[in-house]
Image (spheres, rainbow, N blue to C red):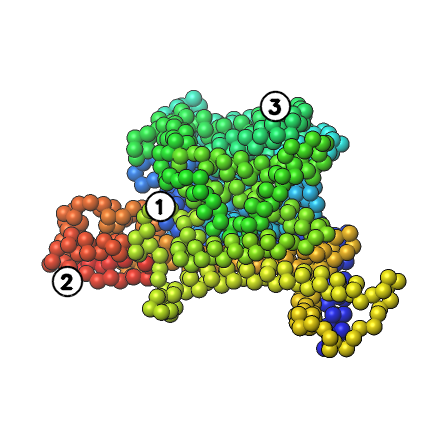
């Protein structure tokens, strides 16, 4: 096919795609694309990897204990109550664990436990994507909504946190969705605001309210300790049934009253989401929303937008969903393994105490800059440029803002305010900064949309800066490939023993080992660099060819005679040869991202960023995370134990407490953390003993069992870089 035919084919395809994306169904098509990317990142192979230690397995065991103990109200871990986290994750996963037989301690856990444990978290992430697209489409436009939502879905942080059965996404996703819904209600044009406020409560929202409140009332009546030995209706069982029915009926009646007489359904939806976020990790979700809007109104002076009579009703809905379990726990006298009540442990220690630093790491102002760069990866420079651009345009502007401008300012404040909050507090963990990723990614979409509208091509200096940052972050990840795993697992920066991350040497370069992990991360960096760079060059070529076409025409548009090329400079000839294929490369993006029915001068770089984002995110979650799981989970080691062991043969966890050995062994393992004499007493008994031990403590194990038992020891599973499964016969 010659150049003209190739160009014509590209143009024809581009025209068809442009007509499709600009047609009457463009919003639906854009939404389907966003959700397809989100599903591709979050759902495939969700249960194919074992739970990561120690957080996933810790929370999974608490939920499994609920199923085994048939107590869905009071979280329990090993031999004491567990008060470190609220209840939502356990409520969502414990019934699913029961369905797949995780409460049966006589056999190995089902292969479905990881799937059902992570599915609720993945669904909350997809809900966030849907709300983000919908609100951004309304307050910005469809293209900015698509670009921002895809940027969010393709950040490594989003992929990691969406595939972890831990509490963070269960507060970040509903809190962020609530923030977006409130932004829509508060920042939209006046006519739309009034229309939304006066809209009646639909039946589907009444159903959602019942779904999140009535089960609480049933569980409270069924398992509440305050009803122990209470016999108001003849016996305790009858009393509990009466309480279950009474509380459920009362809840339905109150919700029906809200539905019958209430208004403002999206504000009520935001209240339910905030209540779920509170049950997910704590009331700081509400504090964050209030903080962001307070700073926004302080900056904009638009306090009149707070006038909304239904706010009181929304507060009532929030309390109806969030308060029942909290009240029950405040009245509960049970204690955890540190002899603390729920109030002393969760409220005083885990909520308020962490402000000053009672747990985790410490760090200076640059702590979260580092981990945001790893979590955003290819998007990090764009996020900084977007925030700075948004603030510089909106702050100090003495004018009446449009809804577009109001939303831009709010999202920028959202990112900066939460970053400042997490930087100030004393306790730090890598994943704490995840809430900042949501507004940062949305602003990337806004910035890319502005870039597509711009009559100027992206400045060369900014392009060089973006490339430099990608190279720098990739270099740091190649040097320390565990940094991505640290974003979603528990480990201190200062504690990195030699066994922490697998070596997996691919080859040696000048006597220096190069691992497959480093090669994979390097490939991600190359993709993140190459596609935007090609797009940038395609945009440059399009501009150059356009300038060339203009220079070969007279004032009336007719072509002038062009010499045969013998007098052209070498630069012009190289430019002609190089620009033509680059221009063809950018033909399709220019048709897709047209502005005012004209090709955008930045279509290539935007398309390159989006394509690299999708490819990198797929590689990060489906290759890096999947391969790392082997070395962060007890699933495979405990599978060997279940296959080899006979009934009654003990499993010892020697000088370790990674939680996974407890979950995958149904809390049947025996923890020996210090006493070597205790271990020797066990192994001296007739029969076989299985021991899980960290690799760097294997020699301690040999010393503990004594010379007479050492000869009968053998490692039966060393598939993990951290732990051995040892059989002592």
The percent coordinates of residue 595 (x first, y second) are: 75, 52
| Residue 668 visible in the snapshot | yes
| Residue 262 visible in the snapshot | no
Front in this rendered view, residue 563 or 671: 563
Q: In which quadrant of the rendered image does the N terminus lie?
A: bottom right
In three-dimensional space, the C-alpha distance between marks 2 and 1, rounded to whole angstroms, equals 36 Å
Q: Which residue is mark 2?
A: 711
> Residue drawn 51% across and 41% down?
435
Badge 3 element: helix
Q: Which mark is residue 371?
A: none
Q: Which residue is mark 3?
A: 312
Q: Which residue is mark 1?
A: 492
Badge 2 element: loop
Say which label, 2 or 1, has the lower sequence index.
Answer: 1
Mark 2 in CB contact with mark 1 (< 8 angstroms): no
The percent coordinates of residue 562 (x first, y second) are: 80, 73
Is 244 on the left-hand or right-hand side of 358? right
Is 551 on the left-hand or right-hand side of 28? right
> Residue drawn 54% across and 54% down?
378
Say which label, 1 or 3, has the lower sequence index.
Answer: 3
In three-dimensional space, the C-alpha distance between marks 1 and 3, rounded to whole angstroms, equals 43 Å
Q: In which quadrant of the rendered image does the C terminus lie?
A: bottom left
Label 1 environment density (alpha carbons within 10 Å; few <14, some 14–19, many ≥20): some
């Amino acid at each position: 096919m010659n150049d003209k035919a190739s160009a014509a084919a590209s143009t024809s395809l581009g025209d068809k795609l442009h007509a499709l994306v600009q047609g009457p169904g463009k919003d639906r098509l854009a939404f389907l694309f966003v959700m397809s990317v989100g599903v591709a990142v979050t759902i495939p192979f969700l249960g194919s990897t074992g739970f990561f230690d120690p957080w996933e397995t810790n929370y999974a065991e608490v939920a499994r204990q609920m199923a085994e103990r048939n107590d869905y109200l009071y979280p329990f871990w090993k031999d004491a109550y567990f008060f470190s986290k609220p209840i939502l994750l356990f409520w969502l996963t414990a019934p699913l664990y029961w369905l797949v037989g995780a409460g049966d301690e006589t056999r190995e856990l089902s292969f479905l436990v990881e799937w059902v444990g992570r599915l609720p978290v993945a669904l909350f992430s997809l809900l966030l994507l849907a709300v983000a697209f919908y609100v951004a489409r309304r307050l910005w436009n469809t293209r900015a909504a698509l670009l921002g939502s895809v940027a969010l879905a393709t950040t490594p942080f989003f992929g990691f946190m969406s595939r972890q059965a831990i509490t963070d996404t269960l507060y970040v996703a509903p809190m962020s969705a609530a923030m977006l819904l409130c932004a829509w209600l508060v920042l939209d044009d006046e006519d739309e605001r009034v229309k939304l406020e006066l809209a009646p409560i639909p039946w589907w929202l009444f159903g959602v309210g019942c779904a999140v409140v009535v089960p609480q009332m049933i569980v409270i009546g069924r398992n509440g300790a305050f009803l122990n030995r209470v016999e108001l209706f003849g016996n305790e069982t009858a009393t509990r049934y009466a309480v279950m029915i009474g509380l459920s009926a009362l809840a339905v009646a109150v919700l029906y009253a809200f539905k019958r007489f209430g208004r403002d359904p999206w504000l009520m939806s935001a209240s339910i989401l905030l209540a779920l976020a509170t049950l997910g990790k704590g009331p700081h979700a509400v504090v964050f929303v209030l903080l962001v809007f307070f700073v926004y109104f302080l900056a904009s002076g638009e306090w009149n937008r707070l006038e909304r009579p239904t706010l009181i009703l929304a507060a009532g809905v929030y309390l109806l969903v969030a308060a029942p379990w909290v009240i029950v726990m405040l009245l509960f006298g049970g204690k955890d393994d540190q002899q603390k009540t729920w109030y002393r442990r969760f409220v005083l220690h885990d909520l308020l105490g962490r402000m000053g630093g009672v747990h985790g790491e410490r760090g200076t102002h640059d702590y979260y800059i580092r981990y945001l760069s790893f979590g955003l990866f290819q998007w990090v420079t764009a996020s900084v440029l977007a925030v700075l651009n948004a603030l510089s345009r909106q702050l100090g502007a003495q004018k009446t803002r449009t809804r577009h401008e109001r939303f831009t300012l709010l999202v920028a404040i959202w990112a900066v305010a939460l970053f400042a909050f997490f930087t100030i507090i004393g306790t730090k963990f890598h994943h704490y900064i995840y809430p900042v990723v949501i507004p940062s990614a949305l602003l990337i979409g806004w910035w890319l949309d502005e870039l597509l509208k711009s009559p100027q091509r992206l400045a060369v200096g900014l392009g060089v800066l973006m490339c430099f940052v990608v190279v720098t972050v990739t270099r740091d990840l190649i040097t320390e490939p565990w940094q991505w795993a640290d974003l979603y697992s528990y480990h201190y920066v200062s504690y990195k023993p030699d066994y922490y991350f697998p070596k997996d040497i691919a080859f040696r370069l000048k006597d220096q080992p190069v691992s497959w992990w480093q090669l994979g991360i390097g490939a991600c960096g190359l993709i993140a660099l190459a596609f935007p760079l090609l797009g940038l060059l395609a945009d440059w070529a399009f501009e150059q060819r356009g300038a060339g076409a203009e220079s070969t025409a007279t004032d009336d548009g007719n072509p002038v005679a062009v010499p045969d090329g013998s007098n052209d400079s070498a630069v012009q000839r190289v430019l002609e040869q190089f620009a033509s294929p680059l221009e063809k490369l950018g033909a399709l993006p220019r048709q897709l991202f047209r502005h005012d029915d004209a090709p955008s001068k930045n279509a290539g770089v935007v398309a390159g960023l989006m394509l690299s984002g999708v490819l990198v995110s797929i590689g990060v979650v489906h290759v890096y995370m999947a391969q790392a799981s082997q070395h962060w989970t007890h699933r495979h080691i405990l599978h060997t134990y279940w296959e080899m062991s006979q009934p009654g043969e003990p499993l010892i966890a020697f000088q370790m407490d990674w939680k996974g050995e407890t979950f995958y062994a149904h809390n049947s393992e025996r923890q020996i953390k210090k006493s070597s004499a205790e271990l020797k007493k066990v192994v001296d008994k007739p029969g076989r003993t299985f021991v899980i031990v960290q690799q760097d403590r294997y020699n301690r194990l040999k010393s503990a069992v004594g010379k007479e038992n050492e000869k009968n020891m053998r490692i039966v599973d060393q598939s993990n870089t951290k732990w051995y499964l040892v059989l002592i016969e």
